[in-house]
Image: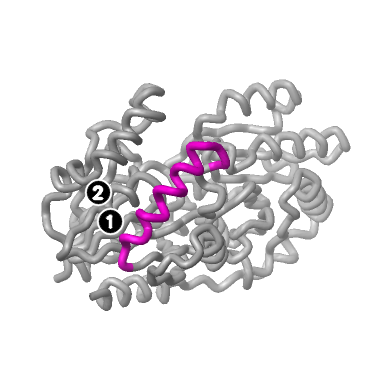
Amino acid sequence: MKKILFGITSLTLGGAERVLVDLANRLCNTFEITIFTIYAGGELEKQLNPKVKLKTLYEYSFSQQNTWQKKFWKPINLLFRKNAIYHQKVQEQYDVEIAFLEGPITRLFSVKNENTKKIAWVHNDISFVFGKGIKAKLKNHIDRKIYSKYKKLIFVSKDNLEKFNKKYPNLQVEKQVIYNYINKENIIKKAEEKINQNLDKTKPCFVTVARLVKQKAIDRVIKVHSNLIKQGLEHNFYVIGEGEERNNLEKQISQEKVENTFKLLGKKENPYPYIKQADYFCLLSEFEGYGMTIEEAKILNKPIIITDTAAREAVENYQNKIIAKNTQEGIESALKKAIEEHKNIENNIKEAKYNNENILNEVIELLKGIQ
């Protein structure tokens, strides 16, 4: 049985993290699976099948560090001591090692190992993910060499692959697109669980599941929400997720005086009952890799509103969708249309067929075939 090592920053509540847990739980009947995390304590660790082994570099969560550790010491330590850290912590020999997220884990797993095949999984738009400053330019320069050390690169969307090729032209590494796998039955089951705080359905109800970071552009959505309320277009907007922008977003909500209609619900280990209750699921980011939560919303048959990012690939064959221009005005127009058409929405919904077992088979074929 082949021994496979997946690496990721942590198993906190996030799209790539949920995909990895679902994949590992299915693959552990075919391969010997180990997951290596940089930080421990992720909420999704307890959802792993007992057959899946778990290793970690630091026995505490990312959030337990101080600002100096997060921004400077740990990234520098991982970058410049990666050989020593890799050999000290990975130790066991694996047939295939997969860095399942761009950034620190991809740099760490790039260490040369003659007997191990290396794969890097790219979940995001590489041209945006590190920002635009000096640090971003340094990371991009370093990562060109890092990615060249891998046997194969896997992208979760065609758009991601195209953006990567523009960023790193002429990089001679084999590349392939494999869309994200998700466990349909698990989503449907969890969506039936009771929650303490039901959504207010007396008016059109929008839900998004997103980290509170600049990429997700929640500040832009708050402004749109406020504008529509002022126009008399009553609705509720709920955000499930946590992150570094919370304080700024709370201040903005207060300044716009929309505390009663725009709610930050924080982290939810099970966001699916909220998605199921919503009239519309939204993902209104500035940029996306693919948008895992869109797949979850499709399984629950929700009307979906997204901005025009790589997420468009997730709704190509999905009828109940609106793709908004990636601007404040575009989002406002899309939400306004949804609110005005809300009374007819139930009659327009047609059940979508969802089956992504072929994606699981693609991953199995990849792991069996890599030499």
Which residue is rendered at x = 31% and y = 60% of the image?
Answer: 149
Q: CA distance from mark 1 to mark 2?
A: 6 Å
Which residue is rendered at x = 66% and y = 58% of the image?
Answer: 303
Picture layout, residue 128 above or below residue 1: above
Q: In screen coordinates, is 49 left or right of 276?
A: left
Q: Amino acid at mark 2?
A: Phe
Q: Which mark is residue 36?
A: 2
Q: Which mark is residue 340?
A: none
What's the magenta bit mostly, secondary-structure-wise?
Answer: helix
Picture layout, residue 187 above or below residue 319: above
Which residue is rendered at x = 40% and y = 51% of the image?
Answer: 143
Residue 312 in the image: x percent, y percent?
63, 63
Q: Which secondary structure lies at badge 1? A: strand
The region drawn magenta spans: 131-151
Q: Nearer the viewer, residue 341 or 51?
A: 51
Picture layout, residue 72 above or below residue 94: above
Residue sticking out furthest to the right: 231
Q: Amino acid at mark 1?
A: Phe
Residue beneath label 1, please? 6
Q: Nearer the viewer, residue 272 or 215?
A: 215
